């Protein structure tokens, strides 16, 4: 039994390595900048959703306010860079740490809340963040910050001529988020989180410190999302509150995980791989008219997938396996 | 040698309602003690106080020579208090083995050891064949077993069983009784709450009868069942239920 | 203003609070109601005040149909029921916005001339804008009606019982779907009422709902899920807080006060002011 389990873990790792390897080769075939752009965004949202999944999927604390951490990552990086000349790499780390600290600070009051009250609190806190940044003159208020162009360099993590460096960074980030999840899944934390999600009272009786579990999940989740935000800011070279802290980011982090399979290892990647290209393609091919057909198609697909596959797309793969196991 | 568990003058009030009044009981090492009483006697409340779900309004609780009155449940578990729930509270989206691993992680920080421990506990409780099944797919009797298995995986000194035998078919109850004996033989003290006397009496070394929040009688099961106070408390209850 | 939020929130209180179903398309219900009111005015010159009952009736049908065609199935999901509800209704919201853009174009519209628009009334020397006043009155009436309805009629009891234990309710012969479809219809009708009145003094565009939806959620949660009176109190508090914040902070920050009060309230009372769930 242990062997079967170990084999499954190893198989997941090998599949991930092969997928990452194939993805790394993709730019050799795909020269089209538009397609490359979609790939970068897909990888980024896969990474974000994977991070969101740690708190909301594994630990069961549904957050629709992760845009806050995304924005904090973006703003920390760009403020440090434009105001103090701190290299984005350090800004990125600083953003991650700040986001994790804020997540834990918010955790104190928030994790006492349950159900809808918790979800609404997360939405509200992100909205407060958004409004504060919109009114914070020093941080550019609603106008935002334009990242000064200093020429292509890895040191400054800035590339104008080619998008490939961003692509590889997004790939690394996505792989990292996946690997962290893979690693945590078979760890004390992973088990604690799932226990907390399913039944906090029973978890407590088995020695699980529920509050600490939630805090841990929040910190890891916020840290990774903030790294994503820092990346996005460098990638766009321009940020304003709405474009890095808007509610849509909170949703776009949750959606891939939900569609792919919430609380599963592969759900977020699978969900992002389908959802993000779909979003971009409907937007540019059907949405050009500005008449909302893209929204109709997009919304209808979300409705259809959530209703048809409540466990997410992952369940398409695991159903046959589960049958084999119970036999 | 001191008792493993002791409650000293414990009171619990919920608003105007007194659930436990001045309850002092003790459980010695290696005993199987039955905590019984009619509905509404305050058994579950006392049980929750001992498990650490909430602190008592007044009085103190001692475990293994230490005052644990205000210690949260998770910490008590680390000290060696394991419990089951009356209403099944398994981790429904996790497999049976994963449920038990959560318990095993209290004393094994290395995953491989926790997993090995969990498998051992499943063997012990007769659930080994169901290891990879989702907890939500178990039948009720198996869920009870899973509750016990999970608690055993925490390697408790004291196992608190909340009506694990109630509502089972006679055969299921028999296997349950055998399991409780096996647990005691493994050196674990057992305190079990049961509503129905017939099931527990042959099993326990000592019975404590609660009624209206107070300790009514305590002693050998054979003496307790013959005690007129117990009979009237239960008869009263029967009549009330029958009416 | 607070009573207007209350009016938007009251429909949500019914769906979200009393039936415990997440409806992320609530803002879009409002948007549709505003458009209905607008077109009734534009094509048939029916004043929004008169068309309000028509809009409410149309929205009733709409709400019931949404429940029967979509939400019913979302509630039946075997796994992750909460998430399925959130994203089914969220998907619906996007579709509705898309449809609104397609059919009504993204243009901002408004009702230029109406019986109420822009007029003020003087009460004891204080000038009150008429639409707001009417909105407030309708809001109070709607709350009172809903309160009586939920607490004094068989249907209200059936609704509550159905939420508590659908299985047991089925045993005594109540059809869960009929009860909930009616509840959704009623919730949507109340939003319809709100939409009709708001059409008078707000611009109407496909995304208009989003800006009110969050406030409505906050209002309901502030008062506490499961309580009609709570939603009403929530609406008043939200209105007052907004007015006070507007005096202290720049207008762009006016929502911060509302959000902060929500957080403060749930930290002290994790189930809202009057919540039972």
Image (tube, coloured by chain):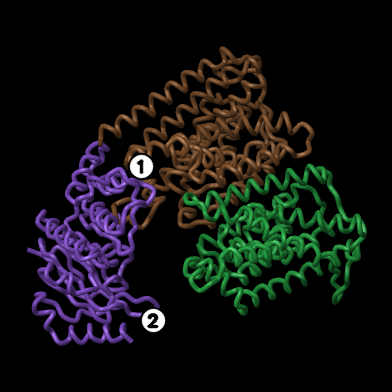
Q: Report in which chain the residue with disc 2 lies.
A: B
Q: Helix, strand, or loop for circle 2?
A: loop
The disc numbered 1 marks a residue on which chain? A
Q: Residue at x 60, y 32 (%)?
A: A276
- Residue at point 39%, 46% (across, down): A193
Give me the C-alpha separation between circle 1 and circle 2.
41 Å
**Residue depicted at 27% across the width and 67% down the height:** B167
Residue A110: x and y in percent read: 49, 53
For label 1, the SS is helix
Q: Nearer the viewer, residue A276 or A203?
A: A276
Shade representing chain A: brown
User: Nearest the camera: C39 or A177?
Assistant: C39
Image position, residue B138 (x, y; %): 32, 53
* Location of mark 1 (residue): A189
State left or right for residue C266 relative to residue B226: right
Q: Residues within 10 Å of mark 1 (few under 14, many from 20)?
A: many
Q: Colour of chain C?
A: green
- Residue C150 against residue C193 in the figure, above or below: below
């Amino acid at each position: 039994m242990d062997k079967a389990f170990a084999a499954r873990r190893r198989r997941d790792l090998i599949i991930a390595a092969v997928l990452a390897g194939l993805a790394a080769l993709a730019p050799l075939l795909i020269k089209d900048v538009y397609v490359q752009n979609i790939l970068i965004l897909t990888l980024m949202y896969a990474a974000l959703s994977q991070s969101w999944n740690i708190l909301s999927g594994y630990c069961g604390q549904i957050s629709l306010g992760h845009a806050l951490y995304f924005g904090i990552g973006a703003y920390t990086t760009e403020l440090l860079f434009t105001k103090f000349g701190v290299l984005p790499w350090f800004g990125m780390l600083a953003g991650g740490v700040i986001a994790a600290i804020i997540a834990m600070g918010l955790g104190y009051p928030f994790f006492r809340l349950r159900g809808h009250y918790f979800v609404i609190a997360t939405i509200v806190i992100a909205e407060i963040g958004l409004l504060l940044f919109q009114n914070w003159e020093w941080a550019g208020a609603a106008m935002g910050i334009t990242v000064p162009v200093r020429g292509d360099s890895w040191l400054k993590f800035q590339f104008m001529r080619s998008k490939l460096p961003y692509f590889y960074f997004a790939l690394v980030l996505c792989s990292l988020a996946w690997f962290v999840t893979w690693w945590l899944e078979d760890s004390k934390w992973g088990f604690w989180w799932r226990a907390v999600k399913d039944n906090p009272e029973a978890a407590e009786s088995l020695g699980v410190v529920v509050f600490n579990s939630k805090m841990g999940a929040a910190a890891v989740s916020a840290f990774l999302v903030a790294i994503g935000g820092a990346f996005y800011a460098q990638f766009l070279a321009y940020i304003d509150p709405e474009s890095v802290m808007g509610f849509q980011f909170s949703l776009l982090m949750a959606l891939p995980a939900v569609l792919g399979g919430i609380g599963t290892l592969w759900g977020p990647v699978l969900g992002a791989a389908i959802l993000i290209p779909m979003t971009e393609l409907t937007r540019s091919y059907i949405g050009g008219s500005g008449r909302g057909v893209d929204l109709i198609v997009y919304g209808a697909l979300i409705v259809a997938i959530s209703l048809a596959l409540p466990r997410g797309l992952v369940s398409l793969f695991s159903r046959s396996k589960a049958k084999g196991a119970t036999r | 040698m001191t008792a493993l568990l002791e409650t000293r003058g414990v009171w619990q009030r919920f608003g105007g309602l007194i659930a436990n009044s001045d309850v002092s009981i003790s459980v010695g090492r290696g005993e199987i003690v039955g905590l019984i009483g009619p509905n509404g006697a305050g058994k579950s409340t006392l049980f929750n106080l001992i498990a650490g779900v909430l602190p008592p309004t007044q009085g103190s609780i001692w475990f293994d020579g230490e005052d644990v009155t205000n210690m949260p449940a998770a910490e008590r578990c680390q000290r060696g208090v394991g419990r089951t729930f009356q209403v099944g509270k398994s981790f429904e989206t996790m497999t049976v083995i994963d449920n038990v691993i959560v318990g095993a992680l209290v004393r094994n920080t290395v995953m491989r050891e926790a997993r090995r421990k969990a498998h051992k506990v499943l063997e012990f409780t007769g659930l080994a064949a169901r290891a990879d099944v989702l907890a939500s797919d178990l039948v009720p009797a198996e869920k009870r077993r899973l509750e016990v298995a999970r608690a055993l995986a925490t390697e408790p000194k004291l196992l608190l069983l909340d009506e694990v035998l109630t509502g089972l078919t006679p055969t299921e109850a028999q296997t349950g009784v055998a399991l409780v004996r096996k647990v005691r033989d493994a050196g674990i003290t057992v305190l079990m709450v049961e509503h129905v006397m017939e099931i527990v009496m042959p099993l326990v070394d000592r019975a404590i009868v609660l009624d209206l929040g107070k300790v009514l009688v305590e002693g050998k099961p054979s003496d307790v069942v013959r005690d007129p106070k117990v009979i009237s408390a239960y008869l009263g209850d029967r009549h009330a239920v029958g009416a | 203003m607070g009573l207007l939020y209350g009016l938007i929130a009251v429909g949500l209180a019914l769906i979200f609070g009393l039936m415990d179903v997440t409806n992320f398309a609530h803002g879009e219900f409002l948007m549709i109601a505003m458009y209905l009111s607008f077109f009734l005015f534009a094509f048939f010159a029916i004043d929004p005040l008169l068309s309000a009952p028509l809009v409410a009736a149309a929205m009733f049908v709409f709400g019931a149909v949404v429940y029967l065609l979509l939400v019913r199935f979302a509630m039946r999901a075997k796994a992750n029921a909460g998430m399925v509800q959130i994203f089914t209704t969220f998907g619906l919201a996007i579709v509705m916005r898309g449809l609104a853009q397609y059919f009504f174009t993204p243009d901002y519209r408004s009702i230029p001339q109406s019986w109420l628009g822009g007029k003020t009334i003087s009460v004891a020397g204080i000038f009150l804008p008429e639409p707001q006043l009417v909105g407030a009155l309708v809001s109070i009436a709607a709350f009172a009606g809903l309160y009586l309805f939920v607490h004094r009629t068989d249907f209200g009891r059936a609704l509550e019982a159905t939420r508590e234990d659908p299985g047991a309710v089925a045993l005594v012969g109540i059809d869960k779907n009929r009860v909930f479809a009616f509840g959704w219809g009623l919730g949507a009708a109340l939003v319809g009422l709100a939409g009709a009145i708001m059409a008078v003094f707000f611009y109407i565009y496909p995304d208009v709902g989003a800006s009110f939806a969050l406030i409505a959620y906050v209002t309901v949660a502030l008062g506490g899920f499961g309580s009609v009176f709570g939603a009403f109190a929530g609406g008043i508090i939200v209105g007052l807080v907004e007015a006070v914040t507007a005096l202290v902070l720049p207008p762009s920050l006016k929502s911060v006060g509302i959000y902060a009060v929500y957080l403060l309230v749930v930290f002290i009372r994790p189930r809202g002011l009057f919540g039972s769930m």
